[in-house]
Image (spheres, helix red, strand yellow):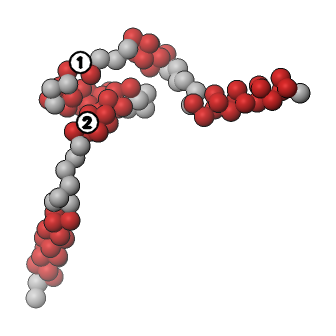
Amino acid sequence: MNPFRRNEHHHERNRTSTRRRFRFFSKDKNRVAGGYKAALSNPRTSRQGRRHAKQELRAMGRDRETHLPFMTKVKRALGIRSSPRQNRESNRRQERRSALL
């Protein structure tokens, strides 16, 4: 018994069982496109990642969705990140509470 052959067989068995498990599900194209659009506007995405997202959107026939607003480009160039929504809402609550007191 060759141990390498056994591992090879084990790997093939896992691959086919995984294929069977996900065979009935397909990716929703709108969600995939949404992920690529999010990658374009995410400031933490690398240039290479943004380039790949643009190429994939264009390959999907969604050329118009690869456009980024000018302000997004400016913020990215200056390193400005907007505060998360949760922080803005909590700040508003604190301001309201202090105004009532």
Mark 2 lies on residue: 30
The structure residue drawn at horizontal position 20% and vertical position 31%, both measured from the top left corner, is 56
The structure residue drawn at horizontal position 70% and vertical position 26%, both measured from the top left corner, is 92
- Mark sitting earlier along the chain (1/2): 2
> Which quadrant of the view contains residue 97?
top right
Per the model, the C-alpha gap separating discs 1 and 2 is 14 Å
Tell me which amino acid carries mark 1.
Arg
Q: Secondary structure at mark 2?
A: helix
Considering depth in this image, is 46 or 67 the residue closer to the camera?
Answer: 67
Q: Position of residue 57 (x, y in %)?
A: 21, 29
Q: Is residue 42 above or below residue 76?
A: below
Mark 1 lies on residue: 64
The structure residue drawn at horizontal position 14% and vertical position 29%, both measured from the top left corner, is 59
Identify the mark at residue 41; answer none if there is no mark: none
Tell me which amino acid carries mark 2.
Asn
Q: Is residue 23 above or below residue 60?
A: below
Q: Position of residue 60 (x, y in %)?
A: 16, 31
> Which quadrant of the view contains residue 43?
top left
Q: Secondary structure at mark 1?
A: helix
The structure residue drawn at horizontal position 56% and vertical position 31%, both measured from the top left corner, is 84
Q: Is residue 29 above or below residue 80?
A: below
Q: Position of residue 19 (x, y in %)?
A: 16, 63
